[in-house]
């Protein structure tokens, strides 16, 4: 199960994206998410797909490994496709059987929505894959810095978000261990009706919750033992600085914005 989850994991490297400032990467992802929802035709989606492939190449990570991050959302994508095919009507009728019909607008909308979800998950996974937990926390804190002037606990929020992301692979690994342990004891998670399968999940959910709370308590004790007292008065071992890589990312974002805006109908 852990091998099927790429979100939340960090792969050390020296690629262009690894060396870029985390703030520029996070701002680019926000802009990319906006552009994904602005795209509304074949050309704009083709541009986004090509740009995404180029971004993956800059990370120097295996495309097959990154595509594993899409596996957890396959069910969501499939449900979205079926929903739009059944509900959205309009255009040429591809198939008709009584009240049931598959029409051009429904198929087009299903494809576009599935591409949106896939592109967002894929590009978002690159953030954690190419950014260390320390840099991720520092970048979030620096971006949210202006809100600290009005009393928002910026450092604590950034730390919680970073820990939450990094706990994803840890919890997946723990779930995998629990499933294997329960299977060795004779548990069956693949047979029976829907209610029976839901009942079979209880031996997984309860130990997982207990393990998660135990890990959270151990982390809190470790932070207290090391003198953690929040963001007040904290110093930094290294300071984030912008470089030509971040300028290149900003330029690419502007070009992408102009191109999508030009070809958008």
Image (cartoon, grey):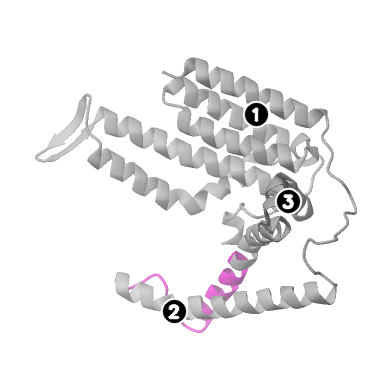
Vertical placement of 175 versus 118: above or below? below
Instruction: Identify the element where label 3 is drawn.
Output: helix
* Local SS, label 1: helix
* Magenta region: 172-192
Is residue 10 in view from this perspective? Answer: no
Quadrant where the N terminus sits is bottom right
What residue would you read off at disc 3?
141
Whether residue 82 is visible here, answered yes or no, is: yes
- Left or right, 75 with reference to 7: left
The answer to if 176 sits in the magenta stretch is yes
What residue is shown with label 1? Answer: 54
User: Where is residue 112 drawn, in percent x and y?
Assistant: 40, 33
Name the residue tied to disc 2.
Answer: 202
Residue 206 percent coordinates (x, y): 50, 80
**Mark 2 vs mark 1, CA separation in Å:** 43 Å
Single out the mark in the foreground, 3 or 1: 3
Q: What residue do we see at 64% from left, 63% from top?
A: 167
Determine whether label 3 and label 1 are within 8 Å by CB.
Answer: no
């Amino acid at each position: 199960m852990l091998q099927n989850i790429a979100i939340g994991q960090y792969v050390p490297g020296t690629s262009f994206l690894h060396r870029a400032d985390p703030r520029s990467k996070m701002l680019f992802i926000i802009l990319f998410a906006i552009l994904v929802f602005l795209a509304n035709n074949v050309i704009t989606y083709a541009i986004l797909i090509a740009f995404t492939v180029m971004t993956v190449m800059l990370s120097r990570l295996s495309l097959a490994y990154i595509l594993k991050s899409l596996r957890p959302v396959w069910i969501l994508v499939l449900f979205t496709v079926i929903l739009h095919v059944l509900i959205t009507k309009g255009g040429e009728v591809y198939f008709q059987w009584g009240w049931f019909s598959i029409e051009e607008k429904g198929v087009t909308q299903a494809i576009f929505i599935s591409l949106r979800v896939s592109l967002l998950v894929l590009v978002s996974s690159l953030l954690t894959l190419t950014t260390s937990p320390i840099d991720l926390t520092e970048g979030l804190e620096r971006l949210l810095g202006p809100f600290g002037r009005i009393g928002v606990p910026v450092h604590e929020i950034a730390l919680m978000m970073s820990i939450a992301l990094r706990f994803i692979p840890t919890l997946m690994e723990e779930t995998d261990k629990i499933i294997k342990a329960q299977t060795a004891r004779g548990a069956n998670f693949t047979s029976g009706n829907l209610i029976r399968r839901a009942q079979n999940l209880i031996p997984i959910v309860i130990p997982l919750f207990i393990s998660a709370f135990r890990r959270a308590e151990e982390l809190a004790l470790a932070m207290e033992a090391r003198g953690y007292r929040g963001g007040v008065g904290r110093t930094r071992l290294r300071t984030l600085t912008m470089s030509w890589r971040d300028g290149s990312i900003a330029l690419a974002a502007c070009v992408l914005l102009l191109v999508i805006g030009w070809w958008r109908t």
